[in-house]
Amino acid sequence: MKMEKRISNYEKMKDEMADGFLRYDQEEMIQRYALDHDEDNLYISFLERRYRIARRTGRVSWSRDDSQTEETADYNEAMTIYDVLCYPKEGLHLAHEWVNVASLSSIQGGTLEKRGDFFQDAGRAFAGKTDALSRACEKLGGKKLEKGDAAYELKLFPFLPLILRFWDADEDFPASLQILVDKNILDYMHYETLMFALSHVLKRLREEM
């Protein structure tokens, strides 16, 4: 029963954000990010998947490449897209300086302590699967980099990259995962939303593996 209530709350928040989306200037969104659009939808690529945002309802959806069946975006997908479209700061631009995502907690004035196992769990999940992780990154359009057993630059959005670096376990150290983001990423989305986005990245990688 508790799980049913939790899912219901997530859906309620998605609906509230969809309503909120409708109050923002869609033409401004189109211009800011050079979005494809038509009378019915705005279109945005999120981790190499093309999403539709219905201009009259705010609903976010996508279709699999091999199917015309419409899939409703899950909580992490939808909330990230809404935040990027509706709440960016003025003068939006990349710093072109990479920072460890963990360092953003001090900028935010918050803490990643409650997320302490976030990257540790992901590192353990990828242990012994370096080749599969590399192939998954490449399926998501990743650009191979040095420094790491699997290291790739991925496009979170076409205008917003990130770097994933993975080191597999050895006799001295457990498997570890590091994610680097542009120093200005919190101009594009809120701190908590970044956690939603990264959760989605890890989910997509596991699916591709």
Image (cartoon, helix red, strand yellow):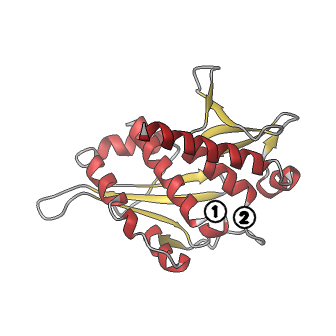
Numbered tag placed on residue 207 in the rendering:
none
Q: How many marks?
A: 2
Tell whether label 2 touches label 1 (CB within 8 Å). Answer: yes
Examine the rendering and report whether any part of residue 16 can be seen: yes
Camera-nearest residue between 153 and 206:
206
Find residue 185 and report its horizontal and vertical position in percent. Answer: 60, 67
Q: Position of residue 152 (x, y in %)?
A: 44, 54
Pick the front one: 125 or 73: 73
User: Which structural element holds mark 1?
Assistant: loop
Residue 161 higher or lower than 95, as above or below: above
Left or right of 152 in this view: 45: right
- Seen in the picture, residue 204 relative to 100 is either above or below; the reply is above
Q: Nearer the viewer, residue 65 or 196?
A: 196
Residue carrying label 1: 189
Q: Quadrant of residue 183?
A: bottom right
The residue most toward the front is 1
Which residue is located at x 72 percent, y 62 percent? 87
Identity of the residue drawn at 11% across and 60% down: 171
Q: In which quadrant will I find the N terminus? A: top left
Mark 1 vs mark 2, CA separation in Å: 6 Å
Say whether residue 39 is left or right of residue 141: right
Residue under label 2: 88
Q: Residue at x 67, y 38 (%)?
A: 51
Amino acid of disc 2: Pro
Residue 192 coordinates in the image, percent (x, y): 54, 62
Quadrant into which the C terminus falls: top left
Q: Which residue is located at x 55 percent, y 47 percent?
A: 76
Q: Label 1 sits on what residue type?
A: Met
